Amino acid sequence: MSRLLALTVLSSALLAPNAASADSCTAARVMVILDKSSSMQTGTVGTQTKWQVAVNGLGQVLSSYEQKAEFGLVTFPRAGMCSPGEVDVAPAMSNRSAILGALTTPPPEGGNYTPMAQTLERAAQDPALQTTGARHVILITDGWQYCVPYDPQTRFDGVPAVETLTQQGVTTWIVGFGSEVDPIALNRMAVAANTAKAGCNPASTDAAAPDNCYFQVDNTTELVQALNAIAGSISGETCDGVDNDCNGQVDDGLSRSCSNACGVGTETCGAGSWGGCDAPQPKTETCDGVDNDCDGQVDEADAPLCDSGEVCVEGTCQPGNGNEGDGAMQAGCSCDAGSMPTAGALAPWLAVGLLMIRRRRR
Ligand SMILES: [Ca+2]
Ligand SMILES: [Ca+2]
Ligand SMILES: [Ca+2]
């Protein structure tokens, strides 16, 4: 084998059917916008500050997802009590250590407020979120939209900020952390983002209510669960001809249940479309006591099921009574008025006739 031919064979073998080239991977881009207000440092969950819980939970989730999506980080406020947050870490693959490295300094115990609406507005202007492709924001906040002096007119400013992101194709996920959040504002923001939970109550004002539209979390476990659910939804492989999770395989590992008149099965995704349902397929009806063509009738005779002269009885072809013709008729045929009587039916009359002939000869 020539060296060129050998190389060709080798490279062909390395290219699996669904292998994706590096530039066909379109990982989602995710900007985590983390509240760095002073209450994240003064508030506690058990023996940890809220800040420690948030950093720990984020680290756990990034361990699982840093190679499935481009994660970046914004913390707010910036220097100055109410300056909007800015990008600490630009979105990229494998960014866990960079993000955790930007979170080593906790917020001061006083003076950092919560300009979440201004931060969302600023994020919408970031070039990283003005590209095409899947782009997301995950807002994690433990408080109200709040600056000093407090202006109640600003309470719902986060809603139009989210609407701006939605309009430019960025999906925003809202995570409320602890009991000091403003549930009705966060509910409205989740609705504006089209990420509200199914059947939720947008008018809820109770952080402990089970039907809030946003993700309410109160400890590390709940935070990790919420972020895993969001990250899983963001980075999951979908049947679209694209390597969504950047594992080098297009539409890999995608299967779902399917059904037809004959039963249930499983179908798999290939090259962007579902197909190949392996549910039992309809077959030609045969005389076997089974509904082969899945029309709800067993051994029905749309066409001959047995040889000529036979009938299908309880799943087997049996000799008929002579009137079957094409072999399709069922046993127990009730012959119509024009049919000839059988030999058995004529026997008594023949016997009477023979007796009368004998008597006349005597
Ligand atoms: Ca994939
Ligand atoms: Ca895909
Ligand atoms: Ca049938």
Image: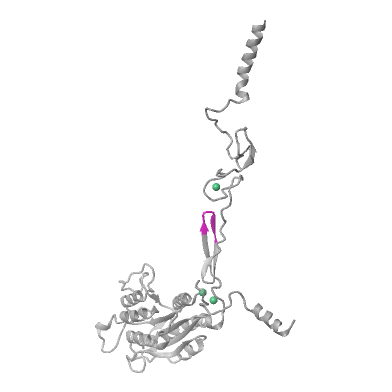
Q: How is the image coloured?
A: one colour
Image point 33% across, 88% down: which residue? 113
Q: Nearer the viewer, residue 228 or 90?
A: 90
Relative height, residue 111 to residue 276 (above, below): below
Q: Quadrant of the N terminus?
A: bottom right
Q: Quadrant of residue 275?
A: bottom right
Position in image of residue 259 (x %, y %):
52, 58
Image point 65% across, 14% down: which residue? 354
Image point 55% across, 83% down: which residue? 22
Start-end of magenta stretch: 259-265
Position in image of residue 158 (x %, y %):
32, 81
Q: Nearer the viewer, residue 339 or 68?
A: 339
Q: Residue furthest toward the right?
A: 1
Q: Residue furthest toward the bottom?
A: 79
Q: Main secondary structure of the magenta part?
A: strand
Position in image of residue 257 (x %, y %):
52, 63
Q: Quadrant of residue 213?
A: bottom left
Relative height, residue 219 to residue 254 (above, below): below
Residue 306 is left or right of residue 202, and the answer is right
Relative height, residue 70 to residue 266 (above, below): below
Q: Is residue 180 visible?
A: no
Position in image of residue 349 (x %, y %):
60, 17
**How many numbered marks appear?**
0
Q: Quadrant of the C terminus?
A: top right
Question: Does residue 342 belong to the magenta stretch?
Answer: no
Q: Is residue 266 visible?
A: yes
Q: Nearer the viewer, residue 49 or 239?
A: 239
Image point 33% across, 69% down: which residue? 201
Q: Quadrant of residue 147?
A: bottom left
